[in-house]
Amino acid sequence: MTASPPTPPGPDDGISRRGLLGLAAVGGAGLVVGGAAGGALAASVAGAASGSGSTTRYDFYGGHQAGITTPAQDRLHFAAFDLADGATRDELASLLADWTDAAARMTQGLEVGETGAVDGSPYAPPEDTGEALGLPPSGLTITFGFGPTLFETAEGVDRFGLADRRPPALEPLPRFTGDALDPARSGGDLCVQACADDPQVAVHAIRNLSRIAFGRASLRWSQLGFGRTSSTSTSQVTPRNLFGFKDGTANLKAEEPAEVAEHVWVSSEQGPDWMVGGSYLVARRIRMIIESWDRVQLAEQEDLVGRTKGEGGPLSGGTEFAPIDLDATDADGTPAIAADAHVRLAHPDVNGGIRLLRRGYNFVDGNDELGRLDAGLFFLSFQNDPARFVTVQRSLARDGLNEYLRHVGSAVFAIPAGVPEGGSIGDALLA
Ligand SMILES: C=CC1=C(C)c2cc3[nH]c(cc4nc(cc5[nH]c(cc1n2)c(C)c5CCC(=O)O)C(CCC(=O)O)=C4C)c(C)c3C=C
Ligand SMILES: [Fe+2]
């Protein structure tokens, strides 16, 4: 049995979070704003919304978690958390239930908690931190995951009684050639991926989930991203990475449901039961030495990637979406796509047919002591077995791009299936 199809996006309702709260308070059932009446109500408050985000709103509840095949939003705030020393299984369950409730509200453009940022007691800290007041939902998706350490036995004690629930596929990633990993930017018991079209909305989501976790879990590392480096829908224009190349052309797209089912979602044959309809997320913080790259001739840049820089077409010929011909040769008999070209080594034909759903983001985090930008690609991929990523990454050991890349952070997480309304993201695991 394969999992149920992804939940379609919710209606594009043009509604802001204060507007929605007002409707909920007045109408009781005001959260259901689809249809003609909802559209009219939404339009009446849309003018109150401000910020750079869109009015797109995605359902939180559904068969699969949102934020995987959802058209990649413009901005990312990703966070890895560790459970507090001595935290109990009950505390883990209550944290996941509280996170689910808050995520369901925030993705609909609502404030956290019944009283939100300003309607609670003046003598208590507000339930919501407030910086998203007046902003529309901005296509926010919040995706939760569980790291291998959550299932570990520490000093003979099964941390959360989950050792026998660990999916065999959820192993820490092996060390790869050229890895220069920083443990402080790697791993984590839990992860939260918040994607939105407005950075303030994504940051608000992580900040509030972090606040809710206080005393039970704390931030281990986090990453901001901009300028999505992948399309996950054919409706999207292919974006560019910081090497200036189109990135995401040959990505798996939501409009290929059979391929997504084959490569992304965990099937009942793969199991375990609680992971069916879920996926595995690999995160790699890849520093790009852009100052060196910027001194490389255009033709060499194109040879290293295997595609043209302008159109993004394969060097074997054709426009952007033309299939790559790995056997094509130039007039002098040399391969049109070099032996060490990135797209050759990442191609399914040399990786046993493996395709990944890439969903990464560009990042620039200031500069280093040499005056070089700390810039790169925060690579994110979803696949139904992390071993698939391992196969492709091992193939990339010979990648000519490696001279300009350093992998400095790494993590892998089990992404459970979505939950029905009223459920918690921890239900299937902790049942
Ligand atoms: C292990 C998986 C991959 C890592 C890590 C990775 C890093 C990385 N990629 C680029 C730039 C491009 N990648 C492109 C294609 C591409 N990359 C991967 C995998 C990883 N990339 C795959 C599976 C593919 C598709 C291959 C195919 O089927 O043809 C491209 C070409 C455009 C595209 O198809 O998306 C570019 C450009 C960088 C800069 C980078 C590390 C920083
Ligand atoms: Fe790539």
Image: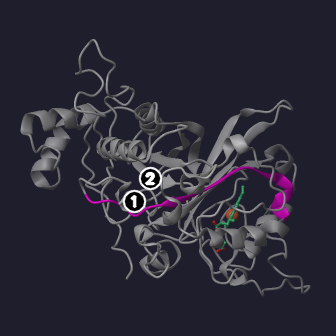
Counting other residues with Cα less than 10 Å from the Cα at mark 1, is it few (<14), some (14-19), or many (20 or more)? many
In the image, is residue 406 part of the stretch drawn in magenta? yes
Q: Is mark 1 within 8 Å of ligand 1?
A: no
Q: Mark 1 or mark 2: name the one nearer the start of the chain.
A: 1
Q: Amino acid at mark 2?
A: Thr
Give the number of the disc on residue 234. none
Is 199 in front, or is 379?
A: 379
Q: Amino acid at mark 1?
A: Gln
* Looking at the image, residue 132 lies above or below residue 150: above
- What separation in Å lies between label 1 and label 2 (alpha carbons)? 6 Å
Counting other residues with Cα less than 10 Å from the Cα at mark 2, is it few (<14), some (14-19), or many (20 or more)? many
Instruction: Please tell me in which quadrant of the rendered image residue 299 appears.
Output: bottom right
Helix, strand or loop at label 2? It is strand
Ligand 1: give its quadrant.
Answer: bottom right
The residue tagged 1 is: 65
* Looking at the image, residue 217 lies above or below residue 320: above
In the image, is residue 408 part of the stretch drawn in magenta? yes
Q: Residue furthest top?
A: 123
* Looking at the image, residue 65 lies above or below residue 100: below
Q: Residue at x 7, y 39 (%)?
A: 27
Is 127 in front, or is 227?
A: 127
The picture places residue 423, in percent across and down from the top left corner, at 28, 55
